[in-house]
Amino acid sequence: MQSRPGKGTTIKHYALNNQEDNRYFTNAHVTERAVREIYIRGFRIAIEESQPLSIMTSYNLLNGEHTADSYDLIQAAARDEWGFKGVVMTDWYTSVDMPMLTGEFKPAYPISASTGCIAAGNDMQMPGDQKNVDDIVKAVKTGEEIDGYRITLADLQFNAANVIRTAIAIGATKD
């Protein structure tokens, strides 16, 4: 797919999304060795061999942390170790209260932190909402820790640069 000008793929759901049913309510407790040797090996191969356009994180938690907030998965493994150059995005409503989870149906864990997504190197939060914007702006302006994460303007610039670089690479900026 990447060989076609202006086209690219998104590999998902990164990582340990081992079930479709009830996927908003899982917290995989797995050793780092098992994660690396079994669960993210296919992602590594896909990134190293084909350099996909983007990666979509999963809804689940890994050892108590949302995959969308995982610096170890996104920045350390995908970008630093495997050389991923594209955009990392959340699955829809990962960092936003999901409209389908209202009423008696409540998630087992809190939603992903918008500041955690930024700190981990997650470039886009899908679809995003005003609370995401407010939390991110407040965290950058005040230097305060919001929802357990401290972020800077440089973190946001890093995320924006990844989006812009990817858009340029696929020709999205041409007239």
Image (spheres, rainbow, N blue to C red):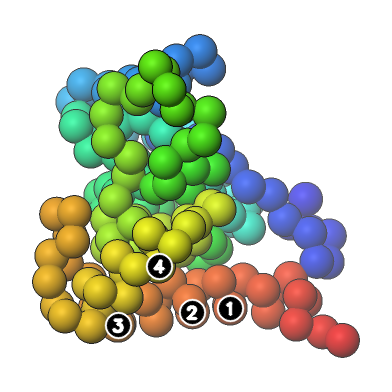
Q: Which amino acid type is marked by label 4? A: Val
Q: Which amino acid type is marked by label 2? A: Ala
Q: Which amino acid type is marked by label 1? A: Ile
Which percent across, then down, holds residue 112?
Answer: 32, 44
User: The residue tagged with tag 2: helix, strand or loop?
Assistant: helix
Mark 2 lies on residue: 161
Q: Which mark is residue 133?
A: 4
Tell me the CA gap for discs 3 and 2.
12 Å
User: Do tag 4 and tag 3 residues touch (Cβ < 8 Å)?
Assistant: no
Q: Which mark is residue 153?
A: 3
User: Do tag 3 and tag 2 residues touch (Cβ < 8 Å)?
Assistant: no
Residue name at image x 49 percent, y 42 percent: 93
Sequence-wise, the earlier of marks 3 and 2 is: 3
Residue name at image x 61 percent, y 71 percent: 166
Mark 1 lies on residue: 164
Of all residues, the one furthest to the bottom in this rendering is 175
Which percent across, then down, holds residue 168?
Answer: 68, 79
125 on left or right of 11 = left
Tell me the CA gap for discs 4 and 3.
13 Å
How many residues crowd around disc 1 within 10 Å: few (fewer than 14), some, or many (20 or more)?
some
User: Do tag 2 and tag 1 residues touch (Cβ < 8 Å)?
Assistant: yes
